[in-house]
Amino acid sequence: MLIRRCAALWLEPREETRFDLDVLLAGGTGVVSSMQWFAHAPQRDEPMDVDAGDVVLLGELSPLDWVAATPLRAHHGTARVRRLLQLGLLVGSTKAWTTQRELDVRMRDMHWHGLSAVCHARSRWDGIDAAGEVEEAGLHNAEGLRQALGVPPPMLHARLDGGACTALPRMPRNAFDQILDARASCRNFDAGKMLPLAQLSQVLERAFAERGRIHGADDFDVLKRTSPSGGALHPTECYLIARDVDGLAAGLYHYRPGEHALQALPLDEEQVLAGAGKHAAAKGMGALDYLAWIAVGGQPYFADAHALCVLAPRFERNFWKYRNHSKAYRVCILDIGHLSQTLLLSATEQGLGSYVTAAINEADIERAFGLTPWIDGPLAVCGIGVRAGDMQTYELDPNHRAWPRKRQVAL
Ligand SMILES: Cc1cc2nc3c(=O)[nH]c(=O)nc-3n(C[C@H](O)[C@H](O)[C@H](O)COP(=O)(O)O)c2cc1C
């Protein structure tokens, strides 16, 4: 048999701390710390405990060149080699290791930059009520943040090494400025109203639809959208959680930019609700409402949106050009920033509320939509909906462009 290392790997030396009563009774602080190695392979959901001997072996092997297994077993021990093969950190050439090898080949063929792949894998959440945690820590408002974290870096920045300032002309404001000024991240949707399909449709068309197409080369067409995209590759897909849209059955959809159409996707209610039991805040929610709530990290004011758009790049489309490229993942994230701003401005133009958030439970979304984190995992969620009559949850609207002054009752 031949062996090589898996495609992408980060070995982390982590300091682990635990409480030990004996140490406390002996006059110490009770806190004991020790070093532990963790192996991060992006195709695996969790980091894996490894020991110093594993690290030496993994550090010896190339991710490209195969070497004979027999001398490795003789030098490092059969049990160690076998355990690392089972974990998928080593890849074996024989039939016994087909499952791990095929997964590794799929990962390899994606052309992820190694560090980006690990960063993407380890920044995912699964079933986290982030809003609940933030509130419990008292960090949900400016006062709490200021008290817990001290003074933030200044709001504005002036260079001390700079020269004279040139005042810039202020131009008269026009309709475009009005749209820009009226955009405010919406945390107050009207649960009693339905979002008309025509309005949702226009927002989706402006943000995601094909606006043109260029034939670059044989079997290589390029999509034109209203937002820019690194390499003109437009890898980002939009998946929809439709909750309260008038004219559209509640459920899951995939937006098809070429046809400007929504394709229904199956909703496995049992699977979606499997993690709901551990959240008191989710008690009594149906599958779709729970999915919306957990998708946005337990933020109830965002879960209320009438439709939620999951933005998920097909990484392969971008990495086809930017192979193992240190900027490629960054470009995918930046693409999503552009798409979301276009979506937000389109919604604002129609008088709708909208938001974007990256505080999302990627794993829950992936399971519901049948996505794979390192193939087409989500990076952000945008919400669209009808604004409520009154502002009950805080929004940043100091100039009263989204809310008339008298409607800001809670503040
Ligand atoms: C990438 C990104 C992630 C965000 N995530 C959250 C979030 O998780 N929760 C939230 O309440 N607002 C979130 N926001 C909204 C910001 O809080 C908001 O943009 C900021 O307060 C400024 O307000 P404005 O959007 O109304 O101008 C996010 C904004 C961006 C751009």
Image (spheres, rainbow, N blue to C red):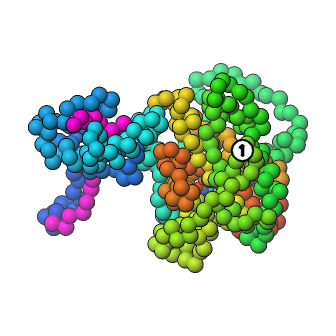
Q: Is residue 63 left or right of residue 288?
A: left
Q: Amino acid at mark 1?
A: Pro
Name the residue at the top extreme.
163
In depth, the one of 54 and 154 nearer the eye is: 54
Q: Residue at x 73, y 28 (%)?
A: 214
Q: Residue at x 33, y 38 (%)?
A: 6
Q: Is residue 193 left or right of residue 377?
A: right
Question: Could you say where residue 216 lies in the image, as x and y percent from the top left?
Answer: 68, 25
Label 1 residue SS: loop
Residue 241 image-quadrant placement? bottom right
Q: Residue at x 71, y 27 (%)?
A: 215
In depth, the one of 17 and 334 nearer the eye is: 334
User: Vertically, is 305 above or below 236?
Assistant: below
Quarter of the image for the C terminus: give it: bottom right
User: Vertically, is 156 above or below 136?
Assistant: above
User: Vertically, is 403 above or below 286?
Assistant: above
In this picture, which residue range is highlighted in magenta? 1-22
Question: Could you say where residue 292 lies in the image, as x and y percent from the top left?
Answer: 61, 63
Q: Residue at x 20, y 64 (%)?
A: 20
In depth, the one of 181 and 87 nearer the eye is: 87
Q: Badge 1 is on which residue?
A: 257
Label the magenta part by its dominant secondary structure. strand
